[in-house]
Structure formats: structure tokens, C-alpha cells
Image: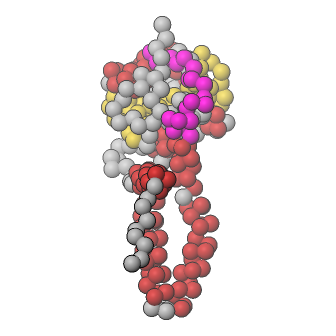
Amino acid sequence: MGPGLPTPDWRDLLEILLIAAVLYRVLRFLVGTRALQIVLGVLLLAGVYVAAFLLRLSTITYLLGVIFTYGAFAAIVVFQPELRSALARLGQARILRLFRDGPADGAGEAIAESLERLARTGTGAILAVEREVGLEEYVGTGTPMRAALSSDLVATVFSPYSPLHDGALLVRGTEIIGAACILPLSQQPLADRSLGTRHRAALGLSEETDALVFVVSEETSTVSLAVGGRLHRALGPDRIRQALAGRLPGDTTASHPVPQTR
């Protein structure tokens, strides 16, 4: 009588749980992105490769082998935005926050007042509030600043006659660190054709960082918020303050509030 089936110990169970958790996170990340369709295509090619190997179709096996050999390098180029976003989100993991200093005091009320003021006047604007992931690399695309945040200054920057109005305003704590900054455009398909470049830029930044990116539409005079790759539209004053306090439903990124100034 042969030996019985091996009995898994706690290490095997731990490995299974870790692998399952990683696969779950990868699938969660892929859902809704172009990477999912590409992965399905790769799996289909892998199935064809296995079938060709079993049927001894040497030419097809050789060609698919070459594709898989050099496909890894092509995938790095094709998936560059997704890989960058994934690494940024990894840096947002809760366990890694233990090694970071807490965020500086923000200016939640000043930001909310600025957005309401811009919406009342129908002034188009993008305002990004830094959280865990730094926005320093985007400061260089515009005009660096070191100015105390106030609603008057924000309104002045986004005035149509200001040379800094065309671009994003970046806020860190109680300070404006950049104006007229260029943000990466999202590649997500937008069902609503009324959403323009400002909304795509806001989504693009929210896909690569955990920033709160507010957009004021000059066409509809409404405030939207991009966070975690999702767009929350037509935010009223209460919802804006909830977002700045880290209480916006559906915000799965680092929920650090922006404290209110007195």
C-alpha cells in the first residue's frame, strides 16, 4: 500500500493565502483597464501554444515561443502607465504608512471656498490636493510656487486673463506649490461627451497618485472630483467638504483628511 496524500502544514496554507491575495489584487487592478483585454489575448496565445506543442506543430510552436520570449519586453512598454500606477498604489499600502510622517495641516475650508467661488463664476479650473504620493514631478511641468493658500489667490490664478490659468494648481498642506501644471491624460473611455480635457487630466493624475483632483467645469459650472481613478460629478459644498475630510464614499485610496483651518 503506497503512502497516503501529504498533509499540508501551516506554511503551505500561508503560501496559498498569499498567492490568492496577490491574484485577487491583480485581478482587481486589471478590471476596467485595457490591460485586461491584453492579458486575455496572452492567455489565448498560451492555449494555442500548448495545443500546438501537444499536436507537434513545430512551426507554430517555434513562432509562439519567439513571441513569448520577446513579448515580456514589449509588455513593459505597452503596460508602462499601468505598471507606474500599480507601483504608486503599492506605495499607498496601509502597512507602508507606518514609515511615513503624517501629512501636514491642510486648508480644507480655503479649498472648499475656492471651489465654490470658481463654480459660481463659471471659471474652469483644476486643483489637485497632495496626499500620500508626492506631486513634485508635476510641479516642473508648470510654474513652481511657494504661496500661502487662499481663495483670493486661487481665484486670481484661474482668472481668464492670468498667464497661469491654463493648467492645474497643486496644493500641499496650506501651500500652493505649482500653477499651470500639465497632468497626464487618462486613457479611460468616457461615456459622457461633455467631459473634456480637464476631466481626462484629473482622472489621469488620480490614476497615478492618490491626490484629490477637483475640476470646475466652465460649461456647467459644476465641481467634480477624480480620486482613485474614479470621477465623482456635481459635488455640492457638503460633498466637497466630505471629500476633503476623507469621508467621500467610494474613495478606496489613502483616506487622510485635509484638516480645516481656523
**Relative image position of residue 116 (x, y in whole percent):** 39, 20
Determine if the magenta segment contains residue 66.
Answer: no
In this rendering, position of residue 20 left or right of residue 142: left
Residue drawn at the location 53% of the way across and 29% of the way down: 131
**Figure check: 131 above or below 153:** below
In this rendering, position of residue 145 left or right of residue 85: right
Residue drawn at the location 54% of the way across and 91% of the way down: 59
Residue with the most extreme top position: 262
**Relative image position of residue 44 (x, y in whole percent):** 42, 74
Is any part of residue 80 visible from this angle?
A: yes
Residue drawn at the location 56% of the way across and 84% of the way down: 63
**Figure check: 134 above or below 32:** above
Q: Quadrant of residue 168?
A: top right
Q: Quadrant of residue 173?
A: top right
**Relative image position of residue 241 (x, y in whole percent):** 38, 21
Residue drawn at the location 55% of the way across and 61% of the way down: 78
Q: Quadrant of the N terminus?
A: bottom left
* Mark count: 0
- Of 116 and 157, nearer the camera is 116
**Relative image position of residue 4 (x, y in whole percent):** 40, 70
Give the magenta part as a residue range.
91-109
- Of 136 and 51, nearer the camera is 51
Q: Quadrant of residue 165?
A: top right
Is any part of residue 114 visible from this angle?
A: no
Determine if the magenta segment contains residue 97.
Answer: yes
Query: Is the image coloured rainbow, by chain, by secondary structure, or in one colour?
Result: secondary structure
**Figure check: 24 above or below 98:** below
